Image (cartoon, helix red, strand yellow):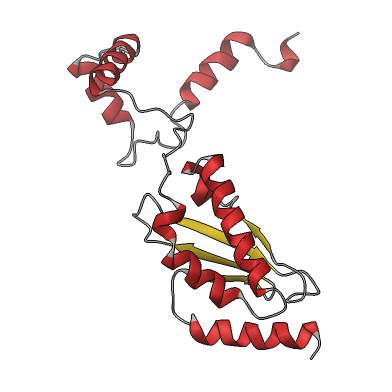
Amino acid sequence: MTANEDQEMELEALRSIYEGDECFKEISPVSFQFRIGDLEDTKAFILDITWPETYPEAAPQICLDAFFNNRISAETKQLILSKLEEQVEANLGTAMMYTLFEWAKDNQEALMENHKPVVTAVTLTSSSDMTSTTSAAKKKEKKEQLTKAQKRRIISRTDNKGELPRGWNWVDVIKHLSKTGGKDDE
């Protein structure tokens, strides 16, 4: 069998095995994502696997660069990749996707035992810090207070949508033109 036929057979098998499984996602006929662990699990990670043209004779490309994996340290990612590479070497020349996914699921705890979540640039501030900064911002943004009479005048000039009616400033335009004169008055 050619590599292309092997790929087609394995792709068909993967589709039938993982049909309806939310952990498996087919990006393209040669690229897949598989989530190891539950979404809420801090030790969960996503494997991105891409087949080269000569797969299964050549090793698939495995990567952990998905955004979901940003909280995993570089050392832990390297450990996961090295362990998966060992599995790839053991299964080279055969259809290995199912084997890799199941091996990663079975060994998730061992792969993530030294996992310490990476703290990203987004930091949480305490609620007391936030209240002090928001109160300072409120003091700076103090709006001009209107009297009841001013509010009534604004409301009486606008329609129910808060918009001024058409032609509300025509009188002002006419007064202005009468004071400045037209083009003929020169």
Q: Residue furthest bottom?
A: 1
From the viewer's perspective, tell me whether residue 21 is left or right of residue 143: right
Q: Position of residue 85 (x, y in %)?
A: 64, 60
Where 95 sits versus 104, above or below? below
* Residue closer to the observer: 7 or 122: 7
* Residue closer to the observer: 113 or 178: 113
* Residue drawn 68% across the image and 16% down it: 182
Tally the numbered discs. 0
Q: Position of residue 107 (x, y in %)?
A: 44, 62
Where 74 sits versus 80, above or below? above
Where 63 sits versus 128, above or below? below
Residue 24 visible, this orientation: no
Where 111 sits versus 117, above or below? below
* Residue closer to the observer: 160 or 146: 146
Quadrant position of residue 141: top left
Q: Position of residue 14 (x, y in %)?
A: 56, 82
From the viewer's perspective, tell me whether residue 133 is left or right of residue 81: left
Q: Position of residue 112 (x, y in %)?
A: 43, 51
Q: Quadrant of the N terminus?
A: bottom right
* Residue closer to the observer: 155 or 69: 69
Quadrant position of residue 29: bottom right
Quadrant position of residue 148: top left
